[in-house]
Amino acid sequence: MVLSLSLFLPCKDKITKEAFMSHFTIKLRQILHKTRDEWAKFAIREMEISPNTITKFYGYKSSCDLEQVLKQDENDANSDICSTPCARSLTSDVSKTTIFD
C-alpha cells in the first residue's frame, strides 16, 4: 500500500516535528483500524470463522464492537445497491439460495 504524504499533513504550513508525528500517528491508527475491520469481515464471511474468535484475536474490546462494524458494513452495502461490487455480491448470494414453492 502506497500512501501519499499529504494524507498525513494537517496543513501546508511549517509544523513542528511533534505535531507532525502526532497527526501521523492518528492517521496511521485510523488506517490500521479500517484494515482490521476489513480483515475481520473477510474472516467471518469468507472463511467462516466465528465472531467470538475474531473478537478475541483481532483486538476488539467486545463482541458488541465487532457487531457494530458488521452492521455498519451491511448498512453501507444496502445504501449503495446500484454499485457493481454490490450487484455482484447480490448475484452470488442468490445463486447459493434454494427457493421452495
Image: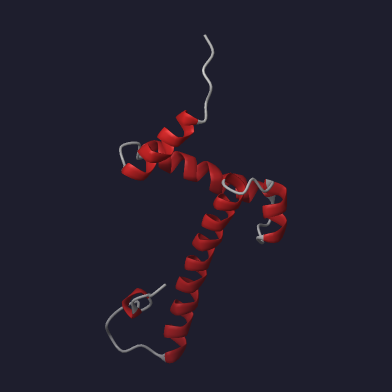
Task: Name the side, left or right, on which 83 lies relative to 46.
Answer: left
Q: Quadrant of residue 19?
A: bottom left
Q: Horizontal and vertical percent for residue 34?
A: 49, 60
Q: Horizontal and vertical percent for residue 64?
A: 65, 46
Task: Name the side, left or right, on which 84 lies relative to 93.
Answer: left
Q: Horizontal and vertical percent for residue 72?
A: 49, 44
Name the residue rendered at 48%, 40% in the picture: 74
Counting labels gives: 0
Name the residue rendered at 54%, 13% in the picture: 100
Q: Does 55 sit above or below residue 89?
A: below
Q: Quadrant of residue 1?
A: bottom left
Front residue (pair 70, 2): 2
Name the residue rendered at 41%, 36% in the picture: 78
Furthest toward the top, the residue is 101
Front residue (pair 6, 92): 92
Name the residue rendered at 57%, 47% in the picture: 46
Q: Does 53 sit above or below residue 3?
A: above
Task: Name the side, left or right, on which 26 lies relative to 68.
Answer: left
Question: Looking at the image, what colour scheme do you see?
Answer: secondary structure
Q: Does 64 sit above or below residue 4?
A: above
